Every structure is written in structure tokens, then in C-alpha cells.
Image (cartoon, helix red, strand yellow):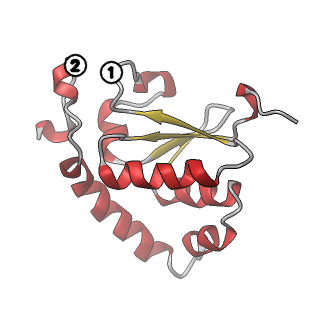
Amino acid sequence: MSVTQQDWQLKLLFDGLCPVCAWEMRLLKRRDRAGVLRFEDIADPAFDPHQYGLTLDDVVGAMHAVRPDGSVMQGVEVFAVAYRLIGATWKAAVLECKPLRPLLNLGYRLFARIRPRLSSFEPCTAGRCRVGGA
């Protein structure tokens, strides 16, 4: 059975200019043998967050993913779902572990705060501005 455009189950909205983010997306792409993931780079000048009901501040401030029905998720949940979809169930199980969830969410929020500094993403050059005008 060949994979078609409609066969994706999760579209990840990521910053391709963030080295950590790009590294993680390469790992996910490499392991996505069934083609269930799609990837959309928020640093692409053609990217429009409004098509998902989001703002640029939203997508720069946290990892987001979109399901085929248009629903949006963010943060650690994105990675748990993506890992489960590609068969990395042990990674998904760690991220879904209820006792660990508060610590994982805190760690993610801290990373999300510094993540824009890791990127050379300059949306102001396209008439848009980075979160907090930083």
C-alpha cells in the first residue's frame, strides 16, 4: 500500500532553524517508515499559523502539531503522540507517565522559553516579529 497525502496522522509545526528542533525532526522523519507524520517548518516565509487558528507567538513559543481533523495539540503531548505513531512506544510511555508529567511539562516549558534563542529564525524580516520582540 502506498502512502498518500491523506494518510498522515500528525503534522508537526517546527522551527527548522533551531538546531535542537531540526535534529529531533530528522530523527522522527527517519523512523517514520509508515509515512504517518508530516512536517511544516514555521521558519518558512510561506508558513501561515492562522490556517491552524494559531498566531506566530503561539508557534514560536511552543511545539505544536495538527491532526487531520484540524485539532491542535502542543508541548510534550506532541512528542508522545509522534513517538507512539512511529512505534517508539517506550519513549511515548515515558512522556505519558503521569508521575513524570509535571516534571516533563516544567522541563519543556523551560526549554520552550530559551528555544527561540537557539534559532536564527528572524520572522521580523518577513514583516512579522518574534515572540516578545526579542
- x then y, percent, for residue 27: 52, 55
Q: Looking at the image, do the residues carrying marks 1 and 2 touch, with CB atoms under 8 Å apart?
A: yes
Quarter of the picture holding the N terminus: top right
Q: Which residue is farthest front?
A: 30
Which quadrant of the figure has residue 75?
bottom left
Q: State which quarter of the image contains the C terminus.
A: top left
Left or right: where 119 falls relative to 45: left
Is 8 displayed left or right of 129 in the figure? right
**Mark 1: secondary structure:** loop
Where 102 sits versus 112, above or below?
below
Q: Looking at this view, is 60 or 16 the one in front?
A: 16
Residue tagged 2: 126
Going by the numbered disc 2, the residue's amino acid type is Ala
Query: Which residue is drawn at the image coordinates 43% and 23% (left, top)?
Result: 50
Give how far apart the Cα atoms at labels 1 and 2 are.
7 Å
- Residue 31 position by quadrant: bottom right
Identify the residue position indicated by label 1 in the image. Answer: 45
Q: Tell me the kind of residue under disc 1.
A: Pro
- Helix, strand or loop at label 2? It is helix
Q: Residue at x 50, y 28 (%)?
A: 52
**Which tag, 1 or 2, sits closer to the chain's start?**
1
Q: In this view, which residue lies farthest toward the right? A: 1
Label 1 neighbour load within 10 Å: few <14, some 14-19, many 20+: few
